[in-house]
Amino acid sequence: MEIVLTGIKPTGTSHIGNYFGAIKQAIEFSKNPNYLSMFFIADYHSLNTIKNPELLKQYTYEIAATWLGCGLDPNKVIFYRQSDLPEIFELNWILNNVTPKGLLNRAHAYKAKVEENKNNNLDADSGINMGLYCYPVLMASDILIMKANKVPVGQDQKQHIEIAKEIARYFNNAFGSCLTVPEEYIPESVGTIVGLDGRKMSKSYGNTINLFGNEKLLKSQINKIVTNSQTPEEPKDTNCSIFKIFSLFANKQQIEEMKARFAQGIGWGEVKKITFEVANSFLSSMREIYNYYINNPKEIDRILEEGSLKARKIAQKTLNEVRKLIGKV
Ligand code: TRP
Protein backbone atom coordinates (compact mmCIF):
# COMPACT_ATOMS: atom_id res chain seq x y z
CA MET A 1 0.00 0.00 0.00
CA GLU A 2 1.28 3.48 -0.84
CA ILE A 3 2.36 5.58 2.08
CA VAL A 4 1.27 9.20 2.31
CA LEU A 5 3.21 11.14 4.90
CA THR A 6 3.24 14.68 6.11
CA GLY A 7 4.83 16.59 8.95
CA ILE A 8 3.24 19.35 10.95
CA LYS A 9 5.49 21.91 12.55
CA PRO A 10 4.33 23.16 15.96
CA THR A 11 4.99 26.87 15.71
CA GLY A 12 1.98 28.55 17.20
CA THR A 13 -1.74 28.69 17.54
CA SER A 14 -3.64 27.62 14.43
CA HIS A 15 -5.95 29.96 12.58
CA ILE A 16 -8.79 29.40 10.15
CA GLY A 17 -6.41 30.02 7.23
CA ASN A 18 -4.44 26.92 8.31
CA TYR A 19 -7.66 24.94 8.50
CA PHE A 20 -9.25 25.91 5.20
CA GLY A 21 -5.90 26.15 3.43
CA ALA A 22 -4.35 22.83 4.45
CA ILE A 23 -5.64 20.84 7.43
CA LYS A 24 -9.08 20.16 5.98
CA GLN A 25 -7.77 18.74 2.69
CA ALA A 26 -5.08 16.67 4.43
CA ILE A 27 -7.63 15.05 6.72
CA GLU A 28 -10.02 14.37 3.86
CA PHE A 29 -7.19 12.77 1.91
CA SER A 30 -6.28 10.59 4.91
CA LYS A 31 -9.70 8.97 4.72
CA ASN A 32 -8.85 7.42 1.34
CA PRO A 33 -8.59 3.67 2.09
CA ASN A 34 -6.12 3.13 -0.77
CA TYR A 35 -3.32 4.78 1.16
CA LEU A 36 -1.66 4.35 4.51
CA SER A 37 -1.56 7.86 5.97
CA MET A 38 1.09 8.99 8.38
CA PHE A 39 0.97 12.36 10.13
CA PHE A 40 3.60 13.45 12.58
CA ILE A 41 4.41 16.43 14.72
CA ALA A 42 7.76 17.77 13.58
CA ASP A 43 8.71 19.06 17.01
CA TYR A 44 12.48 18.95 16.51
CA HIS A 45 12.11 21.00 13.36
CA SER A 46 10.80 23.79 15.55
CA LEU A 47 13.96 23.87 17.65
CA ASN A 48 15.75 26.15 15.23
CA THR A 49 13.33 28.94 16.11
CA ILE A 50 11.89 28.00 19.52
CA LYS A 51 14.30 28.02 22.44
CA ASN A 52 11.69 28.02 25.18
CA PRO A 53 10.87 24.53 26.50
CA GLU A 54 7.48 25.49 27.90
CA LEU A 55 6.50 27.03 24.60
CA LEU A 56 7.62 24.00 22.59
CA LYS A 57 5.56 21.75 24.87
CA GLN A 58 2.54 24.02 24.62
CA TYR A 59 2.73 24.26 20.83
CA THR A 60 3.19 20.49 20.52
CA TYR A 61 0.04 19.79 22.51
CA GLU A 62 -1.86 22.57 20.76
CA ILE A 63 -1.05 21.25 17.31
CA ALA A 64 -1.90 17.67 18.27
CA ALA A 65 -5.23 18.78 19.78
CA THR A 66 -5.88 20.90 16.70
CA TRP A 67 -5.53 18.01 14.28
CA LEU A 68 -7.59 15.74 16.52
CA GLY A 69 -10.23 18.47 16.81
CA CYS A 70 -10.27 18.82 13.03
CA GLY A 71 -11.17 15.16 12.66
CA LEU A 72 -7.91 13.23 12.40
CA ASP A 73 -8.76 9.67 13.39
CA PRO A 74 -5.78 8.04 15.17
CA ASN A 75 -7.25 4.61 14.47
CA LYS A 76 -7.03 5.16 10.73
CA VAL A 77 -3.89 7.27 10.53
CA ILE A 78 -0.49 6.71 12.12
CA PHE A 79 -0.13 9.84 14.22
CA TYR A 80 3.16 10.31 16.08
CA ARG A 81 5.76 12.69 17.38
CA GLN A 82 9.01 12.98 15.43
CA SER A 83 11.13 13.17 18.60
CA ASP A 84 9.83 9.77 19.74
CA LEU A 85 11.63 8.07 16.86
CA PRO A 86 15.40 7.92 17.43
CA GLU A 87 15.66 6.10 14.09
CA ILE A 88 14.98 9.39 12.28
CA PHE A 89 18.00 11.02 13.87
CA GLU A 90 20.34 8.17 13.12
CA LEU A 91 19.28 8.22 9.50
CA ASN A 92 19.69 12.00 9.57
CA TRP A 93 23.38 11.60 10.40
CA ILE A 94 23.93 8.99 7.74
CA LEU A 95 22.21 11.13 5.12
CA ASN A 96 24.35 14.15 6.03
CA ASN A 97 27.23 12.20 4.55
CA VAL A 98 25.70 11.82 1.10
CA THR A 99 24.30 15.36 0.98
CA PRO A 100 26.42 17.87 -0.94
CA LYS A 101 26.80 21.09 0.99
CA GLY A 102 25.98 22.99 -2.19
CA LEU A 103 22.51 21.46 -2.24
CA LEU A 104 21.75 23.05 1.11
CA ASN A 105 23.36 26.35 0.12
CA ARG A 106 20.57 26.65 -2.44
CA ALA A 107 17.70 26.06 0.00
CA HIS A 108 15.27 28.99 -0.01
CA ALA A 109 14.95 29.50 3.75
CA TYR A 110 18.72 29.62 4.22
CA LYS A 111 19.27 31.80 1.17
CA ALA A 112 16.61 34.27 2.27
CA LYS A 113 18.32 34.65 5.66
CA VAL A 114 21.68 35.24 4.02
CA GLU A 115 20.13 37.87 1.73
CA GLU A 116 18.50 39.58 4.68
CA ASN A 117 21.81 39.67 6.53
CA LYS A 118 23.59 41.15 3.52
CA ASN A 119 20.93 43.83 3.17
CA ASN A 120 21.40 44.71 6.82
CA ASN A 121 25.19 44.86 6.44
CA LEU A 122 25.61 41.87 8.74
CA ASP A 123 27.86 38.85 8.39
CA ALA A 124 26.25 36.49 5.84
CA ASP A 125 25.67 33.76 8.45
CA SER A 126 24.64 36.00 11.30
CA GLY A 127 21.89 34.39 13.41
CA ILE A 128 21.87 31.22 11.27
CA ASN A 129 22.19 28.00 13.24
CA MET A 130 22.95 24.56 11.82
CA GLY A 131 19.36 23.53 12.60
CA LEU A 132 18.18 25.98 9.97
CA TYR A 133 20.92 25.03 7.55
CA CYS A 134 20.38 21.27 7.90
CA TYR A 135 16.59 21.51 8.13
CA PRO A 136 16.11 19.90 4.69
CA VAL A 137 18.19 16.85 5.67
CA LEU A 138 16.08 16.21 8.75
CA MET A 139 13.00 16.58 6.61
CA ALA A 140 14.43 14.08 4.12
CA SER A 141 15.05 11.69 7.03
CA ASP A 142 11.42 12.02 8.17
CA ILE A 143 10.24 11.07 4.71
CA LEU A 144 12.80 8.46 3.66
CA ILE A 145 12.75 6.49 6.91
CA MET A 146 9.09 5.63 6.20
CA LYS A 147 9.68 5.00 2.48
CA ALA A 148 6.86 7.44 1.85
CA ASN A 149 5.50 7.51 -1.68
CA LYS A 150 3.52 10.74 -1.53
CA VAL A 151 4.16 13.82 0.55
CA PRO A 152 1.33 16.35 0.61
CA VAL A 153 2.74 19.80 1.27
CA GLY A 154 2.07 23.43 0.49
CA GLN A 155 3.83 25.17 -2.38
CA ASP A 156 6.34 26.63 0.11
CA GLN A 157 7.68 23.15 0.89
CA LYS A 158 8.16 22.03 -2.71
CA GLN A 159 11.90 22.65 -2.72
CA HIS A 160 12.30 20.65 0.48
CA ILE A 161 10.73 17.64 -1.19
CA GLU A 162 12.97 18.08 -4.20
CA ILE A 163 15.96 18.04 -1.87
CA ALA A 164 14.65 14.88 -0.19
CA LYS A 165 14.40 13.21 -3.60
CA GLU A 166 17.96 14.22 -4.42
CA ILE A 167 19.23 12.88 -1.11
CA ALA A 168 17.43 9.55 -1.68
CA ARG A 169 19.11 9.25 -5.08
CA TYR A 170 22.53 10.14 -3.69
CA PHE A 171 22.15 7.47 -1.02
CA ASN A 172 20.92 4.85 -3.46
CA ASN A 173 23.77 5.59 -5.86
CA ALA A 174 26.38 5.39 -3.14
CA PHE A 175 25.14 2.31 -1.29
CA GLY A 176 22.52 0.50 -3.36
CA SER A 177 18.84 1.04 -3.97
CA CYS A 178 17.03 0.99 -0.71
CA LEU A 179 15.30 4.32 -0.24
CA THR A 180 12.07 5.18 -2.02
CA VAL A 181 12.25 8.41 -4.01
CA PRO A 182 9.11 10.22 -2.85
CA GLU A 183 6.76 12.33 -4.88
CA GLU A 184 5.44 15.66 -3.72
CA TYR A 185 1.71 16.09 -3.75
CA ILE A 186 0.65 19.69 -3.84
CA PRO A 187 -3.13 19.82 -3.48
CA GLU A 188 -4.87 22.15 -5.86
CA SER A 189 -4.80 25.61 -4.44
CA VAL A 190 -7.96 26.45 -2.58
CA GLY A 191 -7.06 30.09 -3.17
CA THR A 192 -5.75 32.34 -0.47
CA ILE A 193 -7.75 32.67 2.70
CA VAL A 194 -8.30 36.35 3.32
CA GLY A 195 -7.47 37.90 6.69
CA LEU A 196 -9.16 40.57 8.80
CA ASP A 197 -7.52 43.40 6.83
CA GLY A 198 -8.03 42.00 3.33
CA ARG A 199 -4.48 40.68 2.96
CA LYS A 200 -3.70 36.95 3.01
CA MET A 201 -4.43 35.54 6.48
CA SER A 202 -1.08 35.10 8.16
CA LYS A 203 0.29 35.10 11.67
CA SER A 204 3.00 37.52 10.58
CA TYR A 205 0.37 40.10 9.53
CA GLY A 206 -1.55 39.76 12.79
CA ASN A 207 -4.79 39.49 10.81
CA THR A 208 -5.93 36.01 11.83
CA ILE A 209 -9.00 34.41 13.30
CA ASN A 210 -8.03 31.68 15.76
CA LEU A 211 -9.40 28.29 14.85
CA PHE A 212 -10.17 27.29 18.43
CA GLY A 213 -10.43 30.52 20.34
CA ASN A 214 -13.42 30.75 22.68
CA GLU A 215 -16.69 32.34 21.55
CA LYS A 216 -15.74 35.71 22.94
CA LEU A 217 -12.47 35.80 21.04
CA LEU A 218 -14.13 34.57 17.86
CA LYS A 219 -16.72 37.32 18.13
CA SER A 220 -14.15 40.02 18.77
CA GLN A 221 -11.94 38.87 15.88
CA ILE A 222 -14.88 38.79 13.48
CA ASN A 223 -15.83 42.27 14.63
CA LYS A 224 -12.37 43.45 13.56
CA ILE A 225 -12.87 42.48 9.91
CA VAL A 226 -12.29 45.66 7.95
CA THR A 227 -15.36 46.94 6.07
CA ASN A 228 -16.12 50.34 4.54
CA SER A 229 -18.20 53.35 5.51
CA GLN A 230 -21.32 52.51 3.48
CA THR A 231 -24.62 53.03 5.32
CA PRO A 232 -26.82 49.99 6.08
CA GLU A 233 -29.30 50.88 3.32
CA GLU A 234 -26.75 50.90 0.52
CA PRO A 235 -26.44 47.74 -1.62
CA LYS A 236 -23.07 46.09 -1.07
CA ASP A 237 -20.44 44.35 -3.14
CA THR A 238 -19.86 40.70 -2.17
CA ASN A 239 -16.23 41.03 -3.21
CA CYS A 240 -15.07 41.90 0.30
CA SER A 241 -13.29 40.20 3.22
CA ILE A 242 -16.33 39.71 5.41
CA PHE A 243 -18.31 38.00 2.67
CA LYS A 244 -15.36 35.76 1.82
CA ILE A 245 -14.86 34.79 5.46
CA PHE A 246 -18.58 34.21 5.92
CA SER A 247 -18.61 31.94 2.85
CA LEU A 248 -15.94 29.64 4.33
CA PHE A 249 -18.36 28.60 7.05
CA ALA A 250 -21.73 28.96 5.35
CA ASN A 251 -23.66 26.38 3.36
CA LYS A 252 -25.02 27.08 -0.14
CA GLN A 253 -28.37 28.32 1.07
CA GLN A 254 -26.86 30.64 3.66
CA ILE A 255 -24.58 32.08 1.00
CA GLU A 256 -27.52 32.74 -1.34
CA GLU A 257 -29.45 34.43 1.45
CA MET A 258 -26.50 36.61 2.32
CA LYS A 259 -26.03 37.58 -1.34
CA ALA A 260 -29.67 38.69 -1.49
CA ARG A 261 -29.27 40.77 1.65
CA PHE A 262 -26.10 42.39 0.29
CA ALA A 263 -28.10 43.38 -2.82
CA GLN A 264 -30.91 44.85 -0.71
CA GLY A 265 -28.63 46.64 1.71
CA ILE A 266 -27.57 45.32 5.09
CA GLY A 267 -25.55 46.92 7.91
CA TRP A 268 -22.00 45.68 8.46
CA GLY A 269 -22.81 45.06 12.13
CA GLU A 270 -25.58 42.69 11.09
CA VAL A 271 -23.28 40.89 8.63
CA LYS A 272 -20.72 40.40 11.38
CA LYS A 273 -23.34 39.11 13.78
CA ILE A 274 -24.53 36.51 11.27
CA THR A 275 -20.95 35.60 10.36
CA PHE A 276 -20.17 34.96 14.01
CA GLU A 277 -23.22 32.72 14.41
CA VAL A 278 -22.46 30.68 11.32
CA ALA A 279 -18.75 30.39 12.15
CA ASN A 280 -19.44 29.51 15.74
CA SER A 281 -21.85 26.73 14.88
CA PHE A 282 -19.38 25.38 12.32
CA LEU A 283 -16.54 25.37 14.85
CA SER A 284 -18.22 24.52 18.13
CA SER A 285 -18.21 20.72 17.96
CA MET A 286 -14.61 20.74 16.71
CA ARG A 287 -13.70 23.15 19.48
CA GLU A 288 -15.20 20.78 22.05
CA ILE A 289 -12.93 17.97 20.92
CA TYR A 290 -9.97 20.36 20.87
CA ASN A 291 -10.71 21.53 24.40
CA TYR A 292 -11.10 17.96 25.60
CA TYR A 293 -7.59 17.09 24.43
CA ILE A 294 -5.99 20.34 25.60
CA ASN A 295 -7.38 19.65 29.05
CA ASN A 296 -6.23 16.01 28.88
CA PRO A 297 -2.68 16.13 27.57
CA LYS A 298 -2.10 12.60 28.93
CA GLU A 299 -4.63 11.43 26.38
CA ILE A 300 -2.60 13.11 23.64
CA ASP A 301 0.55 11.42 24.96
CA ARG A 302 -1.22 8.07 24.87
CA ILE A 303 -2.38 8.54 21.27
CA LEU A 304 1.04 9.69 20.09
CA GLU A 305 2.76 6.86 21.92
CA GLU A 306 0.57 4.29 20.23
CA GLY A 307 1.30 5.97 16.92
CA SER A 308 5.03 5.97 17.61
CA LEU A 309 5.02 2.22 18.23
CA LYS A 310 3.52 1.63 14.81
CA ALA A 311 5.77 4.18 13.12
CA ARG A 312 8.92 2.80 14.76
CA LYS A 313 8.27 -0.66 13.31
CA ILE A 314 8.48 0.82 9.82
CA ALA A 315 11.40 3.07 10.73
CA GLN A 316 13.44 0.25 12.27
CA LYS A 317 13.00 -1.87 9.20
CA THR A 318 14.36 0.87 6.93
CA LEU A 319 17.16 1.76 9.31
CA ASN A 320 18.30 -1.86 9.53
CA GLU A 321 18.53 -2.05 5.76
CA VAL A 322 20.47 1.20 5.68
CA ARG A 323 22.86 0.13 8.44
CA LYS A 324 23.65 -3.04 6.57
CA LEU A 325 24.27 -1.20 3.31
CA ILE A 326 26.69 1.30 4.83
CA GLY A 327 28.68 -1.42 6.56
CA LYS A 328 27.71 -1.03 10.17
CA VAL A 329 28.64 -4.24 12.00
N1 TRP B 1 8.88 21.63 6.92
C1 TRP B 1 7.47 21.35 7.00
C2 TRP B 1 6.72 22.67 7.25
O1 TRP B 1 7.31 23.62 7.70
C3 TRP B 1 7.15 20.39 8.11
C4 TRP B 1 7.79 19.04 7.89
C5 TRP B 1 8.81 18.49 8.60
C6 TRP B 1 7.41 18.10 6.89
N2 TRP B 1 9.10 17.27 8.12
C7 TRP B 1 8.29 16.98 7.07
C8 TRP B 1 6.44 18.08 5.88
C9 TRP B 1 8.19 15.87 6.24
C10 TRP B 1 6.37 16.96 5.06
C11 TRP B 1 7.22 15.87 5.24
O2 TRP B 1 5.55 22.73 7.01
Image (cartoon, grey):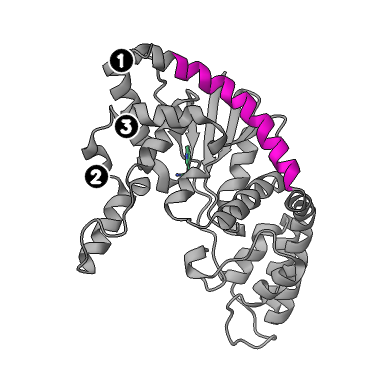
137 and 155: which is toward the camera: 137
Q: Provide the residue designation for mark 3.
A: 96
Q: Which residues are magenta?
A: 297-320
Q: Is residue 183 left or right of residue 172?
A: right
Question: Any mark on residue 105, and which?
Answer: 2
Tell me the distance, in whole angstroms, between the alpha carbons under discs 3 and 1.
14 Å
Q: For the residue with label 1, is its CB less than 8 Å from the closest atom of ligand 1? A: no
- Looking at the image, tell me whether mark 3 or mark 1 is earlier in sequence order: 3
Question: How many C-alpha atoms fall within 10 Å of the one at disc 1: few (<14), some, or many (≥20)?
Answer: some
The overriding secondary structure of the stretch rendered in magenta is helix
**Where residue 289 appears, x then y in whole percent?**
77, 49
- Looking at the image, tell me whether mark 1 or mark 2 is earlier in sequence order: 2
The answer to whether any part of residue 238 appears in the image is no
Secondary element under disc 3, as helix, strand or loop, is: helix
**Where residue 137 appears, x then y in whole percent?**
36, 36
Tell me the distance, in whole angstroms, between the alpha carbons under discs 3 and 2.
14 Å
Are the residues at dot 3 and dot 2 in contact (C-beta closer than 8 Å)?
Answer: no
The answer to whether 237 is drawn above or below residue 83 in the figure is below
Secondary element under disc 1, as helix, strand or loop, is: helix
Q: Provide the residue designation for mark 1.
A: 175
Question: Any mark on residue 13, and which?
Answer: none
- Looking at the image, tell me whether mark 3 or mark 2 is earlier in sequence order: 3
Q: For the residue with label 3, is its CB less than 8 Å from the closest atom of ligand 1? A: no
Are the residues at dot 1 and dot 2 in contact (C-beta closer than 8 Å)?
Answer: no
- Is 171 inside the magenta-drawn segment? no
Q: How many labels were placed on the picture?
A: 3
The amino acid type found where label 2 is placed reads Asn
Q: Is residue 76 left or right of residue 292?
A: left
Tell me the distance, in whole angstroms, between the alpha carbons under discs 1 and 2.
24 Å
232 and 269: which is toward the camera: 269
Are the residues at dot 3 and dot 1 in contact (C-beta closer than 8 Å)?
Answer: no
Q: Hey, which quadrant is residue 101 in on the image?
A: top left
